[in-house]
Amino acid sequence: MYCYICAQEGKETPAVAVCLACGMCMCKDHAIREDLPVEDVLNWGFSRKKITYPEKLPRFLCKLCHTALMQREG
């Protein structure tokens, strides 16, 4: 499979990732990797505690979806 963005430019570049949001295949130049924190909130009835685990969850996004999601963070 080839990178969708490169294919639109007339190039045949092998894809290395799939966008989590839209499913577009991307080469390493067009893929954006983000590592998301993994968190839990423990509710003991009388108090709550937020835990952030040391291992992060990797995700790949295309540049279009990354731009769309980043507009939420302002």
Image (spheres, rainbow, N blue to C red):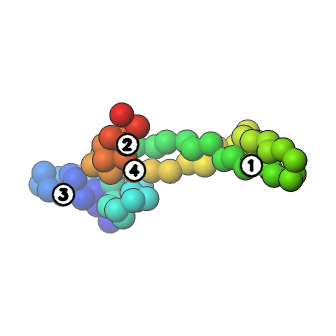
Indicate whether 27 appears above or below 4. above
- Number of other residues with Cα within 10 Å of mark 4, as a class: few under 14, some 14 to 19, many 20 or more: many
Between the residue at mark 3 and the residue at mark 1, the CA separation in whole angstroms equals 44 Å
Residue 66: tell me if it is visible: no
- Number of other residues with Cα within 10 Å of mark 1, as a class: few under 14, some 14 to 19, many 20 or more: few
Between the residue at mark 2 and the residue at mark 4, the CA separation in whole angstroms equals 15 Å
The residue under the point 79% across, 42% down is 49
Q: Quadrant of the C terminus?
A: top left
Please state the horizontal and vertical placement of residue 22, each as a whole percent of the image: 34, 62
Between 22 and 16, the one nearer to me in the picture: 22
Res. 7 mark: 3
**Closer to the N terminus: mark 2 or mark 4?**
4
Q: Which residue is mark 4?
A: 61
User: For residue 54, what is the image quadrant?
Assistant: top right
**Closer to the N terminus: mark 3 or mark 1?**
3
Secondary structure category for the residue under label 1 = strand
Check disc 4 and give the amino acid type.
Leu
Between the residue at mark 2 and the residue at mark 3, the CA separation in whole angstroms equals 29 Å
Mark 2 vs mark 4, foreground winner is: 2
The residue under the point 80% across, 50% down is 42
Secondary structure category for the residue under label 2 = loop
Q: Are marks 2 and 3 in contact (CB under 8 Å)?
A: no
Secondary structure category for the residue under label 4 = strand
Between the residue at mark 3 and the residue at mark 4, the CA separation in whole angstroms equals 17 Å
Q: Which residue is mark 2?
A: 72
Q: Are marks 2 and 1 in contact (CB under 8 Å)?
A: no
Q: Quadrant of the N terminus?
A: bottom left
Q: Are marks 3 and 4 in contact (CB under 8 Å)?
A: no
Check disc 2 and give the amino acid type.
Arg
Between the residue at mark 1 and the residue at mark 4, the CA separation in whole angstroms equals 27 Å
